[in-house]
Image (cartoon, grey):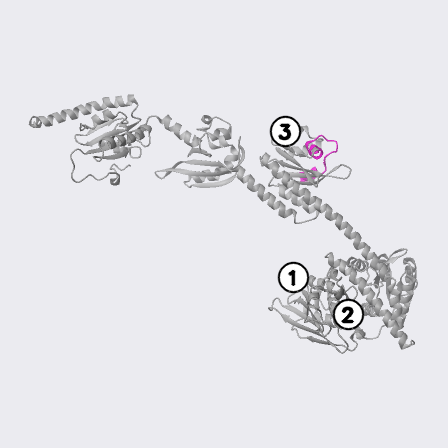
Amino acid sequence: MHDSEKTREELLLEIAELRARLAEPEETVHAIRRGEVDAFVVLEPAGEAVYTLGTAELLRQLQLITDSLPVLVAYIDRDRLYRFINRHYEAWFGRPMHEAVGQPLAAVMGEAAYEAVREQVEAALAGDQVTYERWVPYRGAGERFVHATYMPHVHAGEVLGFVSFVEDVSERQRAEEALRLLADAGERLSESLDFETTLDNAARLAVPALADWCMIDLLQEGGDCRRVVSLHADPARQPLMEELKRYPLPRDSGSRLMQVLSTGEPVFTSDLTEERVEAELRSDDYARIIRQLAPRSSLAVPLVARGRTLGVWSFLYSESGRSYREEDLRVALELARRVAVALDNSRLYREVETANRAKDHFLATLSHELRTPLTPVLAIASRLEVDGRLLPEVREGIDVIRRNVELEARLIDDLLDLTRVTRGKLELHSELVDVRQVIRQALETCGERQLLGRRVELDLASAEHRVWGDPSRLTQVFWNLLNNALKFTPEGGTVTVRSSRQGPPAQGTLVCEVADSGIGIEPEALTHIFNAFDQGRAGITRRFGGLGLGLAISRAIVELHGGGLTAASEGRDRGAAFTVELPLVSELPAGVEAVGQALIPSLLPPSGADRSLRILVVEDHVDTAEAMAALLQVLGHQVTTAGTVATAVAAAERGEFDLVLSDLGLPDGHGHDLMRDLSRRHGLPGIALSGYGMEEDVAKSRDSGFALHLTKPVSLDTLRAAIRRIAGSAVEVGDRS
Amino acid sequence: MADPNPSPEAVPALPEVMPEGFWDLKLYVAGQTPRSVAAIANLKRICEEHLAGKYRVEVVDLMSNPALARTDQILAIPTLVRKLPAPARKIIGDLSQTERVLVGLDFQPRN
């Protein structure tokens, strides 16, 4: 045997080894008893496995660590059951942890919340790490904005579950949303001074950011309320909201909204119970609406501006499941404060608007009153001027009278224009215009007399002259510039009108320069000559004389056309140049068809003999009527006058007329009604003559059947051109029939 | 499933010539169980105090690789195995009783 051959030493070693082996189980037991070991290797069918003792201790530590994190920590297995949660779950869901562990996700967080995160849960169980941020409506914990990360637990290529970290960032989110809301409010509320628009903006700011639906009740004069806003986030519910408008706050109601109005303090009901809602329902129908809207949380804040309570703004949550908190109250109060100020501003603006309209009306009336006495003077002067029987020196005197009356009328026009300009109410009746024709027309209007030994040279070299504009307004601009240039050019001097084209082909600019060799403009005056209200400077007033509003108006007109008007001068006695820049039209604005060169009446070239017409003149101002009749007779027409609507209608019944020329303000009626009548019964064309020359007056005349509207006083040329135009179209109509 | 051989980097190389009185030790632990952590700390303290410069320790985590228990037939954890000086000896427990550990290591104080 081998054993017998072993040395003694070897045997001793072997014995020691055996002893040690025998001692091992005993030592293991001792170590266990002393608590010095806490893990064991166990042989399982699949191989060795380690089991630890003191799992409770480890778990305690794990719990301690996860509980101290400011996030919800959970382990969820692939069956969507909670296997581990930290203590925050208790606080969120209001149930002990042992009740949640082993439960399905949906049973703990609620079906609605589970639906909200289902997609992310599935992604995590598919092995993807997911991070997301969103509002989640937890059961018990309420709606919270969470930042969440799911880390899948993958073992041997299999997803066993995932670890979930959920952080409540609602505060941050609410603060951000509030900031955004208030920033939006600042922007939106400054958009408009209109009362209705402001209310509409307010409602759209609140819904859905701060409410599922909201209402604004405004205090009316006398203490009643009017429900001016009633808006729901869900369009399908809006019809109910419209019905709610029929139920403004009753004055004596003890409701919470009324309380807000009387105390000026907000009312805040975070959790609106059904009983509470029911208790405030006033009538069956109202109850029906409210029950359908099912408010769950409400907030009502006063609208206070400049110390006055204007009304109450109510915010309500229903289907979103959200409820109001202290922070929402602060946001709502701030929003209400801004809206109230905006509403108050729009009220003030409305008051100013009303005052402005009164001023406009006054100016229009004043100009009418100022024009009326000028009409007969101009008519008589025009007639006498062409009366060959008078001595030349008398005719010259009459010419002075006529020119000054025309100047007076022009000043009144300018005054009216200026009020339009300052109020931004100057309207353009734009069409395709050839500026060359406009310039020639303006020149023609200046007349021989103004030229008197001065030459006007036209150098219209631009390849294009077509602009989109109002021909009469553009004529006014060039008339002003030519008139000024001629006025300050000494006899024998020259005024030059040049045109050129600038800019690229698609968006070119027409540049027209009216240059004179006159007394020039000092540099310091150059910046002031366009300012209507800065004419107090003696030098400029002296230079330009009178009110000199023409340049201010001209610049406004050119700017309305999208162009510019500038002045340049090299100094005293070096002449001056005014430059008009207008955008050229290469293509017509969308939706506009090209029209022929439509000329305003005064632009018609005086050519050919006047056809004799039978004209009915309706005018209650006796002097004017007579003067007009005399003037028309000079032009070769047969005239019948009438002072009232009644006599005019009677005259039209008796006799045949080709044309009616009528004042508008008549003692027994309005010229518009008369025109409608004459047009319908006799097919008479008409020309309105009025001291009122505002756009709306002209439009009204057109609507009632007048072919033209002339503003008093009317010059001979204008009247003549107008009549010719009517007569011409009448002939055309006649030819066709 | 698990690799039965310890990874070579985890084991410091032995000196080429084994000096007189060198302790080659292997400590089996199970992750971060309290006794495992205590055993690591105790062994480090004892070795630094008594065997400074004359030892090598390999720590084997059976939690991450249970199959390694087979090598030394480990049952309870922590267990320290003295590979050198021969013969091999096991010391079971967290090594909290220094005297017993020194006896088990077969360490004779110089004086």
Question: Residue at coordinates 70% horizontally, 46% vertically from top-left?
Answer: A345
Res A534 quadrant in image: bottom right
Secondary structure of the residue carrying numbered label 1:
loop
* Chain of residue at mark 2: A
Secondary structure of the residue carrying numbered label 2:
helix
Q: Are marks 2 and 3 in contact (CB under 8 Å)?
A: no
Q: Badge 2 is on which residue? A: A603
Q: Badge 3 is on which residue? A: A274
- Tell me where residue B28 appears, x and y as whole percent: 27, 31
User: Who comes first in sequence, dot 3 or dot 1?
Assistant: 3
Whole-Å distance between the Cαs marked 2 and 3? 77 Å
User: Who comes first in sequence, dot 2 or dot 1?
Assistant: 1
- Three-letter amino acid code at the position of disc 1: Ala
In the image, A400: left or right of A504?
Answer: right
In the image, B59: left or right of A530?
Answer: left
- Tell me where residue A678 appears, x and y as whole percent: 86, 60
Q: Badge 1 is on which residue? A: A590
Same chain assignment for discs 2 and 3: yes
- Three-letter amino acid code at the position of disc 3: Glu
Same chain assignment for discs 2 and 1: yes
- For this rendering, which residue is in front, A145 or A567? A567
User: Who comes first in sequence, dot 2 or dot 3?
Assistant: 3
User: Which residue occupies the extreme front position in the image?
Assistant: A538
Asked if residue A93 is positioned above or below residue A459 in the image, the reply reads above
Residue A660 in magenta stretch: no
Quadrant holding the C terminus of chain A: bottom right
> Which span of residues is magenta-colored?
A238-262
* Chain of residue at mark 3: A
For mark 2, does the 10 Å Cα neighbourhood hold few (<14), some (14 to 19), or many (20 or more) residues?
many
Res A653 quadrant in image: bottom right
